[in-house]
């Protein structure tokens, strides 16, 4: 069903770690007591093949600079909302394999929980969202968090889990990639609670936030409003609006954000 790779990492003096592979791979990382920066870029093989076929003409130099897919304006829920790496799974052996993947990913995440900087890929976020009940992981030293997300149900749950366990986060970077979620879906349908109430206390130390490829759908607006309302120490919020958005859409988006209540009187919001 999945390609399988097992890697054991023991590096007590390692400062920076980057893992690039499939979510089905098993990484056992122990003794990373000196780790400062972790970049976990794990993908679903099915998604990678799909991207190769449909996005071969895209610029591959920087994923952060890619335009959001024009199909994102569809008001139907994304195929990713059911969890991309779960699609097509039927047999008991396949279900067991997926559960094992979830446990392995959470164990890997636990092994880098002392890092001050963490980058998490889209597929990994989906796995975290589906399996966050397996292992409580406090990111007690995390200062900078970079997330790549499709804003699917599982991605939102993954974001919620990491934020709830990052009590001293100062810098949040979010890149919205290949968004196909409904423009009318409300955040509580994915978050599972009232976002504004649930975020209280989470962004106490947050000073800087950046969101890329924002197109103004309801979920994005609610996340941005929730951040502004709860980040008491926020100094700067930068929003990169997705290229190709009509002028009126851009204007309405900026107006809604600027008029949102802010917990920090010194918070500056910039749009690009």
Image (cartoon, rainbow, N blue to C red):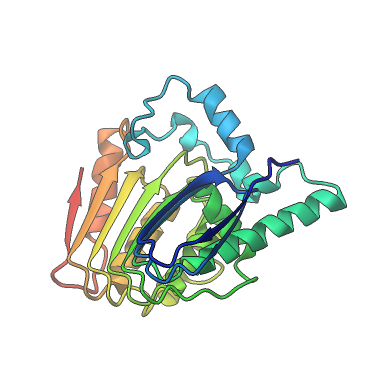
Residue 260 can be seen, yes or no: yes
* Front one among 252 and 47: 47
Rendered-image quadrant of the C terminus? top left
Residue 90 placement, left or right of 80:
right
Name the outermost residue toward the right: 92
- Residue 189 shows in the view: no
Quarter of image, res 250: top left
Q: Quadrant of the N terminus?
A: top right
- Image position of 179 with respect to 209: above or below: above
Please tell me which residue is depicted at 31% across the width and 51% down the height of the picture: 211
Residue with the most extreme left position: 266
Q: Is residue 93 above or below residue 102?
A: above
Number of residue marks: 0
Where is residue 44? Give x, y as percent.
60, 42
Q: Is residue 184 left or right of residue 105?
A: left
Q: Please tell me which residue is depicted at 23% across the width and 53% down the height of the picture.
A: 238
The foreground one among 28 and 55 is: 28
- Residue 73: horizontal and vertical position, in percent? 46, 36
Q: Nearer the viewer, residue 76 or 64?
A: 64
Residue at x 62% of width, y 37% of height: 45
Question: Is 82 situated left or right of 12 in this image?
Answer: right
In this view, the residue farthest toward the top is 57
Residue 84 position within the rendered picture, expressed as x and y whole percent measured from the top left:
63, 45
- In-front residue for pair 245/209: 209
Estimate the x, y position of residue 25 in percent, counting from the top left.
63, 49
Q: Is residue 77 above or below residue 17?
A: above
Residue at 54% across, 53% down: 124
């Amino acid at each position: 069903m999945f390609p399988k790779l097992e890697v054991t990492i023991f590096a007590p003096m390692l400062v920076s770690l980057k893992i690039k592979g499939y979510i089905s791979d098993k990484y056992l990382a122990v003794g990373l007591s000196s780790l400062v920066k972790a970049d976990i870029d794990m993908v679903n093989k099915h998604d990678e093949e799909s991207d190769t076929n449909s996005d071969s003409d895209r610029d591959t130099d920087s994923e952060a600079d890619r335009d959001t897919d024009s199909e994102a304006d569809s008001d139907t829920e994304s195929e990713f909302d059911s969890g991309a790496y779960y699609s097509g799974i039927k047999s008991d052996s396949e279900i067991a394999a997926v559960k094992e993947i979830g446990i392995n990913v959470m164990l890997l995440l636990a092994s880098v929980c002392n890092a001050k900087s963490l980058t998490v890929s889209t597929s990994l976020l989906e796995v975290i969202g589906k399996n966050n009940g397996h292992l409580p992981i406090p990111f007690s030293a995390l200062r900078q968090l970079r997330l790549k997300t499709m804003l699917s149900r599982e991605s939102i749950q993954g974001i919620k889990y990491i934020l709830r366990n990052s009590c001293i986060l100062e810098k949040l970077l979010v890149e919205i990639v290949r968004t196909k979620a409904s423009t009318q879906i409300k955040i509580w349908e994915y978050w599972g609670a009232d976002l504004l109430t649930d975020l209280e206390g989470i962004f106490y130390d947050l000073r800087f936030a950046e969101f890329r490829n924002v197109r103004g759908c309801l979920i994005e607006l609610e996340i941005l409003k929730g951040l502004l309302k709860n980040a008491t120490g926020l100094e700067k919020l930068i929003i990169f609006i997705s290229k190709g958005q009509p002028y009126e859409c851009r204007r309405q988006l900026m107006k809604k954000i600027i008029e949102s209540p802010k917990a920090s009187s010194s918070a500056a919001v910039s749009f690009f």
